[in-house]
Image (cartoon, rainbow, N blue to C red):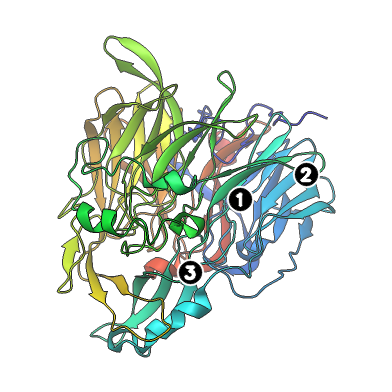
Amino acid sequence: MAWGPVAAAGDWPLHGYDHANTRFSPLTQIYRGNVADLDLVWELRTGRQGSFQATPIVVDGVMYLSTPYNDVLALDAATGRQLWRYSHDLRRQEFCCGPANRGVTVAGGRVYMATIDARLLALDAATGAKVFDVEIANPASGAREVMTPLLGEAVFRNAEVTGGTGYGANMAPQVFDGKVFVGITGTGYGLHLDLKDKSGDAALSVVGLSGGDHGLRGFLAAYDAATGAELWRWYTVPGVDWTGEWRTETPDGAPLDRDLAAERASAAQWHESWRLGGGSVWTTPAVDPDRRLLFIGTGNPAPQMDDLTRPGDNLHTCSVVALNLDTGKLVWSFQQVPHDRWGYDAASPPVLLTVRHEDRDLPAVAQAGKTGWVYVLDRQTGKLIRKSEPFVPQRNLFSRPTAAGVEIAPAILGGSSWSPVAFSAAERLLFVEGIHHPARYFSKRLEPKPGSPWQSYTYMELLEDEQWGTLTAIDTDTGGIRWQVKTAQPLVGGVLATAGGLLFAGEGGGDFGAWDTTDGRRLWAWHAEAGVNAPAISYAVGRRQYIAVAAGGNPLFNFKTGDQLLVFALPAAAE
């Protein structure tokens, strides 16, 4: 069998289109001059309503689509006619991180999916029959229950628990050379609460609680694509040496407001905190086949935000990491935020590209950070080549949470969240969705209680009266912003760029649009019933080009949920 994607012209064979995660389609039938004629040609309701984040995969005229709660549909990509459906039987009804799945991967006649109950499935691509079903981790692990005593604190009374630490998997797997790569999520998730704001509406708060057994240890694993056997596992938190260099600055020179004296004084007491140190892997890796390297972003440390019981830099959380894809051995790590206090996961998928540096072309990897910068790194060494201009406002960045509260932007939502970027090599532009949604961060000590491990807690409250989004084109050779568009809502979901000079993106209010890649002019828009908070794709069947996107919203941002897949094309006479 061929265990890599064998793609025909016009397919969308991988989550990021290619192993570099560029999300750039070479199709040109739809272009700047005719995109205004784009119209809906078919749609599908999946029957599974929830945060709908999936990237459809199209291979040989068949579309493979995952839904919230991990159903999978095979569809005729030209008409939407259902060919088969797999309905997933969940082992557990409580999930760390919600019902979303970000897509499947297809190779060797099989469809691979990671599930929210922490399994890796292989389905027969022709029939949907299950080929294998292996456990990645036990989804019952975690500490949601032991964190609930915190709800006795006055500020959290009557709050609804909407998520907590636990094992799950919602990334679209990567596949290459007979291996399927999957990361685990929820290991540093903290306690997610809906609090009532002054108007009585629910507002998100995230809480981290020091001490106690309420984190987990993140990892990425490689599995044999034929059998499902685990081949290797790399833990994001390395062990006792996760303390690192005790940095006072980020690697790019931004000052970190750390109390190193207090951290060092507590190092002996908390020398095993790495065992539950967090570091989820939320999004699909990029692959460099020539260098045999796999590139991932890692999540925040645990306990989330509260640092009293995890002294040190907390390696390799909040990092862009290169692994040997054959062995899983660490090649290099660039930690964007040592000793994270703010929830600054490296969540957006890394993308491989070539940039100009010191008058030569250099192989690089770029990642859009929650901090509001795009980091461009040397692909072989991990050294920082440059970081971009900020693509969202920054305020009190890396300030320590206080008892009175400090307003920080970007906050826990980003910057850039899990949203995939797109890269146009011809224009040398990286297109990034941004979130401006500041938060107030608080840190409080707890009254000592006999037998209680809790010592302090840190939490944040989003500022509901200040939020909007940015759509930004960044010059990868300079880091400068070529153009930027401001949107009414924070942008989350991801973008698609095409050789027709178009950039496609959706908004939480339901708008789905196309922009000119050269100057950011909006050229076309469609309004959906639910939030369009998933990345679009482009594919062709026969001589017709299509644009497809999921419209299912995102409750985390209070965007209306739904269950639609929307597929657009030019009228037949205009093709």
Q: Where does the N terminus fall, quadrant-wise? A: top right
Q: CA–CA distance between discs 3 and 1?
A: 29 Å
Which labelled disc corresponds to residue 229?
A: 2
Mark 2 or mark 1: name the one nearer the start of the chain: 1
Disc 2 residue type (three-letter): Ala
Mark 2 or mark 3: name the one nearer the start of the chain: 3
Disc 1 residue type (three-letter): Gly
The residue indicated by pointer 3 is 214
Q: Is residue 513 visible?
A: no
* 343 horizontally vs 316: left or right: left
State the image coordinates of residue 113 (x, y, percent, origin top left): 68, 51
Q: Where does the C terminus fall, quadrant-wise? A: top right
Mark 3 or mark 1: name the one nearer the start of the chain: 1
State the image coordinates of residue 128 (x, y, percent, origin top left): 81, 53
Which residue corresponds to the image point at 46% horizontal and 36% vertical from the top-left? 321
Identify which residue, 51 or 117, lies in the foreground: 117
Tag 3 secondary structure: loop
